[in-house]
């Protein structure tokens, strides 16, 4: 079943999320394709499949106590994994990391359920060099939690995996870009 989930997710990503043209990525690099993963993570079937695949991967490590990631890429993924974990009788708490502290209310950088000492799996939709998610990882570490694993939908295969492994973070991607193009 896990393999059929992955194959169906591949179809959805290829049909909805891979755009062709001339794009500038968050890393500043130029690309002839863009992966708009939100078109898949904001699709009911797509986010359900991602949640199932990620939750199965998380369950392999019983030390993981909490899940989260940087807003916006991780928002629907976190929601999906939380709902599925509840359905399976092992509910996980979740959190989101803002790009910057909000200027009103509590002024938090991290929203939700993250506590000192938590062992965390973080999510991101797409990584190129990993720069944007590193800021979120550092915020989680600064809060006293341990980031054990990063799970991504697509690794663009431009250095992110080795960067995270050098940081002591296990890296899992459902797909490498070479699987999708």
Image (tube, rainbow, N blue to C red):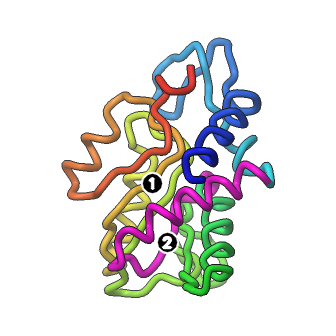
Q: Quadrant of the C terminus?
A: top right
Residue 103 drawn at (x, y percent) = 62, 71
Q: Which residue is mark 1?
A: 151
Residue density around tag 1, few if under 14, some if 14–19, many if 20 or more, within 10 Å: many
Quote the CA–CA distance across marks 1 and 2: 10 Å
Is 44 left or right of 104, judged from the image as shown?
right
Image point (45%, 36%), residue name = 155
Tell me: 170 left or right of 47.
left
12 to 56, vertically: above or below: above
Tags 1 and 2 in contact by the CB under 8 Å rule? no
Q: Is residue 10 left or right of residue 153?
A: right
Q: Secondary structure at mark 1?
A: strand
Residue at (37%, 83%) from the top-left corner? 118
Residue ranking furthest to the front: 1
Q: Position of residue 12 (x, y in %)?
A: 72, 36
Residue 171 or residue 74, whichever sits in front: 171
Q: Position of residue 144 (x, y in %)?
A: 31, 81
Whether residue 72 is in magenta: the answer is yes
Q: Secondary structure at mark 2?
A: strand
**Which residue lies at the image location 44% right of the left edge and 71% below the top edge?**
59
Residue 20 colored in magenta in the image: no
Mark 2 Cα-neighbour bin, 10 Å: few <14, some 14–19, many ≥20: many
In magenta, the rendered stretch is 45-73
Q: Earlier in the sequence, mark 1 or mark 2?
A: 2
- Residue 38 lies, in percent from the top left, at 70, 44
Q: Nearer the viewer, residue 9 or 69?
A: 9
Above/below status of 140 relative to 22: below
Examine the image and state in which quarter residue 148 appears.
bottom left
Label at residue 68: none
Q: On the image, numbered disc 2 is attached to which residue?
A: 67
- The residue that appears at 63% across and 48% down in the rendered structure is 5
Numbered marks: total: 2
């Amino acid at each position: 079943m896990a393999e059929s989930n992955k194959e169906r997710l591949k179809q959805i990503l290829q049909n909805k999320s891979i755009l062709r043209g001339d794009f500038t990525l968050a890393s500043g690099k130029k690309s002839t394709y863009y992966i708009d993963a939100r078109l898949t993570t904001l699709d009911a079937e797509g986010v359900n499949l991602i949640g199932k695949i990620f939750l199965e991967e998380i369950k392999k490590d019983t030390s993981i106590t909490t899940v989260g990631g940087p807003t916006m890429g991780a928002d629907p993924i976190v929601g999906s994994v939380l709902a599925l974990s509840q359905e399976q009788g092992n509910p996980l708490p979740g959190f989101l990391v803002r790009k910057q502290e909000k200027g009103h209310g509590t002024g938090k950088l991290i929203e939700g359920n993250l506590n000192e000492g938590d062992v965390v799996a973080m999510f991101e939709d797409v990584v190129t060099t990993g720069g944007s998610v590193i800021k979120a990882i550092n915020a989680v570490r600064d809060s006293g939690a341990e980031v054990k694993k990063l799970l991504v939908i697509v690794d663009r295969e431009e250095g992110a995996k080795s960067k995270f492994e050098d940081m002591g973070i296990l890296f899992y991607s459902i797909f490498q870009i070479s699987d999708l193009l």
